[in-house]
Structures are given as structure tokens and as C-alpha cells.
Image (cartoon, helix red, strand yellow):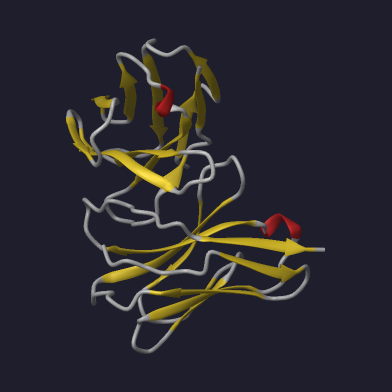
Amino acid sequence: SQTIHQWPATLVQPVGSPLSLECTVEGTSNPNLYWYRQAAGRGLQLLFYSVGIGQISSEVPQNLSASRPQDRQFILSSKKLLLSDSGFYLCAWKSRVRTEAFFGQGTRLTVV
Amino acid sequence: DAKTTQPTSMDCAEGRAANLPCNHSTISGNEYVYWYRQIHSQGPQYIIHGLKNNETNEMASLIITEDRKSSTLILPHATLRDTAVYYCIVISQTSYDKVIFGPGTSLSVIP
């Protein structure tokens, strides 16, 4: 069966520090991968999606970047965090033959 | 993707059926209706999807109108654990779809 791993579960980082969140998927190949952010009390905002290794599409201009160095690995990064980067970050995957997406448990990032 | 509109919030008594409506008047012929829910501080969970026929699984039923411009998610016997934000979205059957969420409906199941 397919599983998605996302870590860490919680993270507190100072303003100006770098960020690296990692997401890996098991049990499938060539998935579509997604990063979402959810600010407190707000909806899910799609940040990046990827349809293959090295292929990244950005949905909104922001202080973050994404990379996909391997087929089932998706990384969200920042060189210098801002207070506004605080939020709940979710990774998701979707296969090419089915359209339902499956989500990780999320990382709650607090920038202080 | 076609846009959807849902009520901001709803209440439902425990044990009763919860009926969550969704309007998707601009849906196109190759777009499916999907429902997800998000329990507080967790990732969204897939519930059910359909194209034009009504669907049922162990979690819920999905009723899609004949013109496909609206649908209703039915939780037949709501429990306190069903308290969550419910998202209705439409997705076309292509490989490169972006899964875009709206604000959803916040369902509160009341004892």
C-alpha cells in the first residue's frame, strides 16, 4: 500500500533562518506531488506541484522554493524565513491513473 | 478547475444525517466532483467522488443532480468524530491536475 511520510511534525524557527521540510512517498512510482500551506484559521493554499523529477510549478510568489531530487521525494525550502511563513504545511501525492490525492500529517511551522 | 461554493458552516445533531451541499454550476463534462474533509490539525482525508451517478461507500453517499450543477454529501449517522471542514472540489481526469481547495464547510456535530 502507498504511504506518505512528512517530517518534522512541529518546528519552531527564528526569523532569517533556513528551512527544509521533506516529504517522501512509498509504494507508488511517478506520482504528482504537492506542497500546501494553511495559515491559522484559513484554507489550504497550493504552493508548488511537481509532475516529475526536477519539474516544479509554483502557484504563488513567495519566500519558499521546492525541489524534487528523486521520484518520490519532495522538499520545501527557504533561505531566510519570515514571520509570515508560519503555518501548517502539508505534502500530498496523486497517481496518474486516479485523481484522489492523499495527504501527509503535516508540519506545523512557527517562525519567531 | 471549476469553482465551487459551499456554506461556511453547518450544525448537525449527533446520530442524524448530515447533508452538505455544494454548487458547481460551471462544471464541465470531464470534471469529477470530489469531497475531502479535514479534522483539526490533520491532513485532508479523501471521502468520495463521482461523475454523474450517485455514489456510496463506507463513509458517505454522494448525490449529484442530473444537470451536475450541484451535489450533496450525506453522512448518514453523524458522530462527534465527523466534526471537520468538508471540501467540495472538481477535478478533471488529466494527469497534471492541480488540486485546488476552497474554504469548505465547517461541520459541527452537536451531542
Residue at far left of view: A55
> How many labels, in total?
0
Residue at far bottom of view: B66
The relative height of residue A96 versus residue B52 in the rendered view (above or below) is: above
Indicate the position of residue A32 as horizontal and vertical percent values: 28, 42
Which quarter of the picture shows residue B23?
A: bottom left
Between A14 and A22, the one lying in front of the other is A14
Indicate the position of residue B100 as horizontal and vertical percent values: 34, 53
The relative height of residue B34 versus residue A9 in the rendered view (above or below) is: below
In the displayed structure image, the side of residue A17 where residue A104 appears, left or right = right
In the displayed structure image, the side of residue A96 where residue A1 appears, left or right = right
In the displayed structure image, the side of residue B17 where residue A51 appears, left or right = left
In the displayed structure image, the side of residue A65 where residue A100 appears, left or right = right
Residue, x 46% and y 28% (percent of image)? A86
Between A63 and A36, the one lying in front of the other is A63
The relative height of residue A11 versus residue B93 in the rendered view (above or below) is: above
Indicate the position of residue B50 as horizontal and vertical percent values: 40, 72
The relative height of residue B8 versus residue A81 in the rendered view (above or below) is: below
Which quarter of the picture shows residue A57?
A: top left
Residue, x 75% and y 58% (percent of image)? B80
Indicate the position of residue A98 as horizontal and vertical percent values: 33, 56
